[in-house]
Image (cartoon, rainbow, N blue to C red):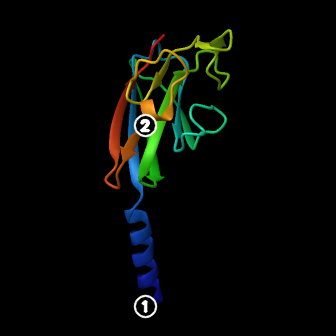
């Protein structure tokens, strides 16, 4: 009898967890990984060392797909990049301009460092699918 109550509590707890399906398009080639960084606060975005969650995957025919599960509903932003030299960093020219393909959620046109507000979206308990395109 106590086990049934535990299952009910587990179901209630996971009922509020959401899944985020991310598709990254326009990956130049399939030979190096694509890293997808998920951020959940404005003060951490887009600091690569302060992400909320991260996944690395290979592209297939120019597209990479990842899924983040068990996420609490709320605001999130994504930064993805094609890690062409496989160093787990978005390489930059003069420390500023990306030298590897990168993309942001909502695909904003930015003229400087992107902000959480420009790239964030709301994840509901029902989950969400987002698509972003890499720029080289």
- Measure the alpha-carbon separation of dots 1 and 2: 44 Å
Q: Which residue is found at the position 46% from the left and 80% from the top?
A: 6
Seen from the viewer's position, the closer of residues 18 and 66 is 18
Q: Residue 65, can we see it?
A: no
Instruction: Give the secondary structure at mark 1.
Output: loop
Q: Position of residue 81 (x, y in %)?
A: 53, 22
Which quadrant does the N terminus fall into? bottom left
How many other residues sit within 10 Å of disc 1, few (<14), some (14-19) or many (≥20)? few
Q: Quadrant of residue 15?
A: bottom left
- Above or below, 51 against 35 in this view is below
Q: Position of residue 63 (x, y in %)?
A: 39, 23
Q: Position of residue 56 (x, y in %)?
A: 55, 32
Residue depth check, mark 1 versus mark 2: number of the one nearer the observer: 2
Determine contact: label 1, label 2, CB under 8 Å: no
Residue 116 is marked as none
Q: Which residue is found at the position 47% from the left and 13% from the top?
A: 29
Q: Residue 97, can we see it?
A: yes
Q: Is residue 42 left or right of residue 47?
A: left
**If you read the primary sequence from the N terminus, does the residue marked by circle 1 or circle 2 appear first?**
1
Residue 120 is marked as 2
Residue 1 is marked as 1
Q: Quadrant of residue 60?
A: top left
- Above or below, 45 against 91 in this view is below
Q: Which residue is found at the position 35% from the left and 29% from the top?
A: 131
- Above or below, 136 against 34 in this view is above
Callout count: 2
């Amino acid at each position: 009898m106590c086990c049934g109550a535990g299952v009910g509590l587990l179901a209630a707890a996971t009922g509020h967890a959401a899944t985020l399906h991310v598709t990254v398009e326009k990956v130049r080639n399939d030979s190096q990984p694509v890293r997808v960084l998920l951020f959940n606060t404005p003060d951490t975005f887009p600091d690569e060392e302060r992400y909320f969650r991260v996944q690395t995957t290979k592209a297939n025919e120019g597209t990479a797909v990842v899924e983040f599960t068990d996420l609490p509903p709320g605001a999130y932003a994504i930064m993805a990049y094609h890690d062409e030299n496989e160093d787990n960093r978005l390489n930059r020219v003069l420390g500023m301009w990306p030298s590897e393909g990168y993309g942001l959620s909502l695909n904003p046109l930015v003229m400087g460092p992107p902000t959480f507000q420009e790239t964030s979206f709301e994840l509901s308990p029902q989950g969400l699918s987002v698509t972003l395109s890499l720029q080289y």
